[in-house]
Each structure stands twice: as structure tokens, then as C-alpha cells.
Image: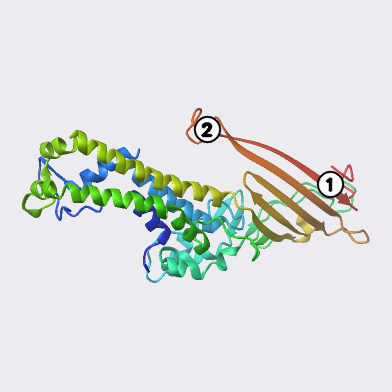
Amino acid sequence: MNTVSTYACIITAILGFASWPAHASEPCPAGKISMSEALDHVIQEAAGLTPEGKKAQVDADLQKTEAAASTQVASPSSAQAGTFIVDRASFPSLLGMAIENGLLKNKDNVTTVDLNLFAFLGMARPQVVYDQSRYENYEWLRRFGGTASFGGKGLKFDRNGDGMADEPLEAKEFGDIVTWEVRVRPWWSQSRDPRESYNYKLIAQAVESPQSAYSEEETNFLTRHDPKIKEMNEGGTGCVESKVWNDFIETPKVKTEIASIGAKAKATIAARDDYVKTISNRLVWALFAGGIERKPQFGPNSIRAGLKLDWRQSSLNLEWMKTDALIGEDDPKSLKAGYKYTTKWLKGRATSEGVDLSASGSYEKFRDDPDAKHDTV
């Protein structure tokens, strides 16, 4: 499988349903319907999915897959691998796609570039997004991320030595204030991206048994009703009179068989969802380093480094930061730790997704910081 995402194929294998032998090669005339589409529809209904629900499910899964590739090292959630098909992407077109995909943003006089290298590669060479084998080759690249921001507002500090803090200045030139951060997911930390080889292979294994049972049930149904299928398939067109089809599908025996096929399809989807949930709860590590470079009139420079952990519904951040001091003084330093727990409240009642409910806490330790009111917060 070279040109289609294996993970997407897992989705469509589950949601694509009937391997119908009588496909309509052309649109059916008025009063007739496509037997393959009609059978898909009744199985989807039996599995608890409408045609619209099927498409929405596929679209949502693919979007989550692309987003996962972009957020493994805690890059902004709006950064996603682009889905544009281009042969030779010029710099202007790549710039336009970067803006459209949220990789380049401008807000409040701050221009931010999301250093999601794989997303930029995906825009220039879409094959690496859609071709599973090529996608696997860049697992290492998806471990890196970061941001670079230009502009903004400086700090409030005494610029003229009169002992009074002066109001912060607004950056006017591109290099007045530069804020940067680089992130890396270390080698021991696996991704939550379902398309990484170690994940989608396990997903395929998880659905293998229920998928086999579903396929067998569907094949047996088609075999049992082969004579009737051939009878309804007028002229081999794959089309059938609506009334003839409805009479067939409403037969008590057929309804029971369709319900059984739908139940097995539903079990296959549930097996996949259960394993995807397991992946989404995996512990993910990220190391980061960053800093702010300011021209003197905008305030002192600073550097920072730390660690971020995400596990299940919890996240933990540890950060060390040092800020340049005035001449003759020690550089202020700080150590911060933050924890956040997030859960869904009233899921399925207030809204289908529920309401986010979170609790957080932090600890900060300061050293040589004249602006800190307390050494520990």
C-alpha cells in the first residue's frame, strides 16, 4: 500500500462496509437506486451510523491523525499538516499555505512562525502525508517542533536611570524583540499519532478478530442471497427498482441478518476506538529550551529550559529561567513547576463532547530577583 494512508484504510475498511458485487457503473435512472449504496446504507443504520455520520467519522479521524503529527512536541493545536496537492510549491504558495494552516500568524503586532518542520515538508511534498511508507520515514522529524515570534511589547523598567519605571515600548522593527522556543520528544517517548508504525500496526491487530467476523458475516449474506441479487440486478447495471429493493430488505429474515452484520461492524469500530483511546492516554515527554532576545530599550534578555509531561488527563511542566541583570548585579533566576488536571464534565448531557473542567497548581522559587516579593510562591 503506497499511495493511501494505512490508517485511513483501517477506517474505511471498517466504515466502507459492503463488498457488493453489483456496483452501478453509472448513475441510476429515476425510480431506481444503486444496490451497493442501498446495502451500505442499511448496514450503516444497523451499526448506528448514517451516511453523513460515516463521512464525518472518516473526516474527523483523518483530521485527528494530521493534527497528532503536528502536536507531538506541544506545538500550537492550530498547526496541522496541510492537505494541499501541489506539484512544485513555490515560496509564495508555501507562504500562503503556511498562513492558511496557522503556521504563520500575526496578532497584536507579533508575527509567529510555528517551526513544525514536518508540516512544512507536507505542504511542499504532500506525498509524505498521504503515503504511509513515506510518512513512516519521517518519524524522527515529527519529534521536533518550536516557535519563533517577532515583535510585541517590551518590559516596564527604568530606562533612563531616574529611579522610576518607564512604560514598555512597542517593537517597530522585526528584530526589536525575538522570542523563540525549540521542543523535542526524546527517543524513549512514543507518539500518540495513530499513523506511527508502532501504533497503526497495533490498531490493525486490535480490530483483526472483529473485522474478520464482520467480513465473514457479510460474505455469507451475499452468498446466501446471490440468486436474488442477480435477479434484482437488471441488465447487470447494479440498479434496482426502489420498491423491489424495499420489499427485499424488509423481509424479516433479511432484516435479522442485516442487524447481525451491523452489530459486528459496530464491534469492529468499538475495538478500534478502544485502542485509539489507549494510545491517547500514553505518557509523552517533551524537552524544551527558549528565550527572548531584546534590544536594550525593550528590556533584558532571558533564557529558559525545561520538561513537559502529558499523561492521561494530567500535564506537568518544570521550567528553569535566567534573566540578564543590570551591570554589577547577579542574574535573576527562577524555578517553576506547574500541574494541570483536565476532565470532561456532563459529557453527553450538556453537550455531546461535555464541558472541560480543570484544576491546576504551581510552585515558583526565585533567586536574586529584586522584583520578586517573595522567594517562594
Q: Secondary structure at mark 2?
A: loop
Quadrant of the frame with the N terminus: bottom left
Q: Is residue 135 left or right of residue 333?
A: left
Relative placement, left or right, of 253 versus 206 is left
The answer to which of 144 and 168 lies nearer the viewer is 144
Query: Residue 165 bears which disc, if any?
Result: 1
Name the spot of residue 168 as percent of width and height, x first: 75, 49
Q: Secondary structure at mark 1?
A: loop
- Density class for disc 1 (Cα within 10 Å; few <14, some 14-19, many ≥20) is few
Q: Amino acid at mark 1?
A: Ala
Exactly how many numbered labels are in the figure?
Answer: 2
Residue 312 makes an appearance in the image: yes
Give the residue at the far top of this rendering: 349
Instruction: Tell me if 78 is positioned left or right of 168 in this view.
Output: left
Residue 341: which numbered mark, if any? none
Q: Residues within 10 Å of mark 2 (few under 14, many from 20)?
A: few
**Which colouring convention does the figure follow?**
rainbow
- Which sits in the foreground, 89 or 359? 359
Q: Which mark is residue 347?
A: 2
Q: Position of residue 377 (x, y in %)?
A: 84, 42
Q: Dividing the picture into quarters, in which one does residue 113 lie?
A: bottom right
Residue positioned 45% across, 47% down in the render = 271
Mark 1–mark 2 distance (CA, rounded to whole Å): 49 Å
User: Looking at the image, can residue 178 be seen?
Assistant: no
Position in image of residue 140 (x %, y %): 57, 68
Identified at 56% across, 67% down, the residue is 141
Residue located farthest toward the left when viewing the structure as drawn: 235
Amino acid type of disc 2? Lys
